[in-house]
Image: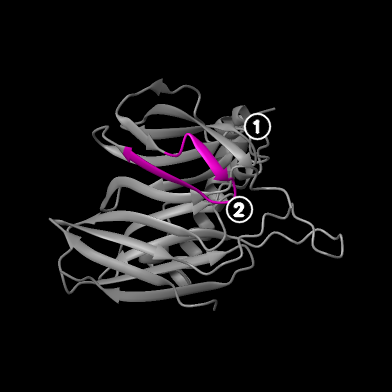
């Protein structure tokens, strides 16, 4: 199989679609989202598959990523998490709850004028490592914090 | 559509601190209702903040975000009196935008 050719073709048709959208005025430049909702990553059922889908092959452990989350969360349905990246040139912050049915929680874009900080509340199905991956200068960095949950947040 | 968001945006030094509470069920698609049937997934997929019409923050998120999502973030280059709009869009194509004025 000529994979390169496939990729080129796919890229070309996607670019064509975007161009058509601009041309018809359906999409103003300000509407173009830098962040796309990456279906394959969001539907990945393991940490490994999620990272693969996001093209994160390796990430360096970094103390410059600060994760503030409770050590023990009584209610897994609402676990507050505070993330700060002190890595210069932070482009995005991605969050994963490793033991959730779908580990990838999301990506927050930091290239347009936001300070590399975000606070979210997430569901944690069972005690799990909370992993944050920061992209800066084309490289990936990570930090992990364990959160214990006494009542899970994903069942029902 | 959906309920109005509660947005608080306040200058803290030279950055605007933003907190937003969105009214949304954030159904995972894994829960069963009282009739034993799976409740279909219904969750916000994308959020975006604009400062005076220019995108300053955006995110792609999953159903793992808690019901009635709360986000806090900080925006550079803002000043009191600026307009901050936040938009969300869910997996059913529903969307909502609310705007506030940043306070000093």
| Helix, strand or loop for disc 2 | loop
How many marks the image carries: the answer is: 2
Assess whether residue A154 is covered by the magenta stretch: no
Instruction: Tell me the crowding category of disc 1: few under 14, some 14 to 19, or many 20 or more residues within 10 angstroms, Cα based.
Output: some
- Chain of the residue where label 1 is placed in the rendered structure: A
Query: What secondary structure characterizes most of the magenta part?
Result: strand
Element at label 1 = loop
**Alpha-carbon neighbours of circle 2 within 10 Å: few (<14), some, or many (≥20)?**
many
Q: Is residue A110 visible?
A: no
Residue B96 at x, y = what percent?
48, 74
Q: Residue at x 64, y 37 (%)?
A: A126
Name the mark on residue A34.
Answer: none
Question: Who is closer to the viewer here, A40 or A79?
Answer: A79
Q: In which quarter of the image is residue A48?
A: top right
Distance in Å between CA atoms under marks 1 and 2: 16 Å
Q: In this view, does B68 lie above or below B73?
A: below
Residue designated by label 2: B63
Q: Name the residue under label 1.
A: A46
Tell me where the magenta segment starts and ends, as one range.
A69-84
């Amino acid at each position: 199989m000529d994979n390169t050719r496939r990729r080129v073709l796919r890229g070309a048709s996607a670019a064509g679609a975007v161009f058509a959208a601009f041309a018809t005025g359906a999409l103003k430049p300000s509407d173009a989202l830098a962040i796309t909702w990456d279906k394959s990553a969001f539907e990945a059922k393991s940490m490994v598959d999620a990272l693969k889908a996001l093209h994160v092959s390796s990430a360096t452990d970094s103390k410059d990523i600060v994760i503030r989350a409770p050590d023990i969360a009584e209610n897994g349905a609402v676990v507050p998490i505070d993330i700060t990246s002190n890595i210069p040139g932070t482009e995005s912050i991605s969050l994963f709850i490793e033991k959730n049915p779908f580990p990838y929680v999301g990506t927050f874009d930091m290239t347009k004028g936001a300070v590399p900080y975000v606070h979210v509340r997430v569901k944690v199905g069972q005690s799990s490592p909370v992993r944050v991956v920061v992209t800066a200068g084309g490289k990936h960095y990570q930090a992990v914090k364990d959160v214990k949950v006494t009542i899970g947040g994903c069942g029902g | 559509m959906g309920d109005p968001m509660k947005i608080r945006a306040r200058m803290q030094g030279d950055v605007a601190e933003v907190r937003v509470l969105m009214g949304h069920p954030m159904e995972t698609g894994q829960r069963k209702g009282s009739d034993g049937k799976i409740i279909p997934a219904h969750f916000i997929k994308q959020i975006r903040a604009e400062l005076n019409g220019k995108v300053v923050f955006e995110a792609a998120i999953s159903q793992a975000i808690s019901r009635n999502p709360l986000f806090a973030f900080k925006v550079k280059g803002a000043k009191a009196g600026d307009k901050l709009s936040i938009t969300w869009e869910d997996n059913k194509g529903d969307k909502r935008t609310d705007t506030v004025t940043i306070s000093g």
